[in-house]
Image: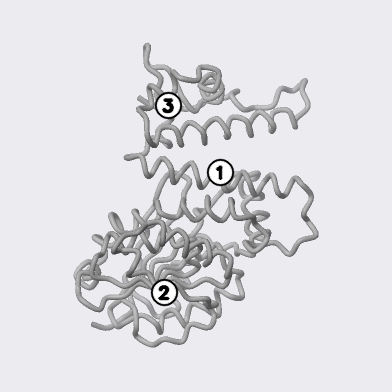
Amino acid sequence: MSVAPPPSALSPDPNDDPAATLEAAAWALAALIATLDDAATKPLADVLAADPQRTAVLEAAGLVQRDGDTLVLHPSYRYPDGPTNRSAAQARLSSLRQAVAAAAGDQGQAGGWADQDDEVLLNQGRASAGTGRAIAGKVVPALPGLADRLDGQGSRILDIGTGIAALALTLAEAFPRTEVVGIDVLERALELARKELAGAGSEAAGRVTLRHADVVDVAEQAAYDLVWLPAPFLAEAALAQALPRLIEALKPGAWIVVGTNPAVTAPLRRAVAGWHAVRNGGNAYDADRMAKALTAYGLGDVRRFPTMPGGPVLVAARRIGS
């Protein structure tokens, strides 16, 4: 069954203050975040039934719809398992926290992740575990030779902007013969990462190495079987400096996987995406532009992998060689 929001669900009332509709949309997003988080550990039907007022908000926004006596989520939010539900909730919670910070009037700050509090760093970082699962379960098996590489002794992955190391830990768990090196320019994030890894208490956590380093200073040659680069979090100048260094860091025949934002055509979403990127010290690259850039740097076999609806598009490319 196709589930789509009624045309007027979040449309402004012509007789109302437009800000009232935006405020209602923020509350609808809050209802979605809380519902996804609850559904990580409980059946969705129980979650929807437990808070009928919250569910009524979701229904009014077109995020759930009735199929007879059953309420079903919009297809965009039907995630395959609890951890993915939680990752999706945490990603949206991180964005909402950043919007609140912007509303609080911190325009005089330099922007970027250094200006975010620990809760934002933790939420954003934990959300990245979902991307790690997508890389391990969807991307690696589809890239020729990569699964075999990561199954070999001495295989290595480089995680750029590791944050709290959630993605690094996910990859270490997925590939038990692989060392994952996570680098980040923000020491405070690495302090949180050390606590997260210590709390994990797993063998995989012991194969994650953290380094305080800037991506533009990566100087290793032919050292990694896989490089993960979350491109939206880098300023455009830094991205231009980093890409050739990261390509040199790949072993011949190895792969780089780059997280990119999907192309957005809706004017409001496009404007918000630009503001958000600039505030966080990011860039305006989308999947199309990144694919062209990787080709221009001499990489081959460029492939694209959508993740969750509205989520990042992963662009993979291979360093020529064997």
Disc 3: CA contacts within 10 A as few (<14), some (14-19) or many (>=20): some
- x, y (%) of residue 4? 47, 27
Q: Earlier in the sequence, mark 2 or mark 3?
A: 3
Amino acid type, callout 1: Leu
Question: Gap between marks 3 and 1, in whole Å?
Answer: 24 Å
Disc 3 target residue: 3
Secondary element at tag 1: helix
| Colour scheme shown | one colour
Figure quadrant of residue 276: bottom right
Q: Which mark is residue 93?
A: 1
Q: Is residue 18 visible?
A: yes
Amino acid type, callout 2: Thr
Is residue 24 placed above or below 285 in the rendered structure? above
The mark lying in front, picked from 3 and 1, is 1
Question: Gap between marks 1 and 2, in whole Å?
Answer: 35 Å
Amino acid type, callout 3: Val
Viewed as shown, does residue 115 lie left or right of 183? right
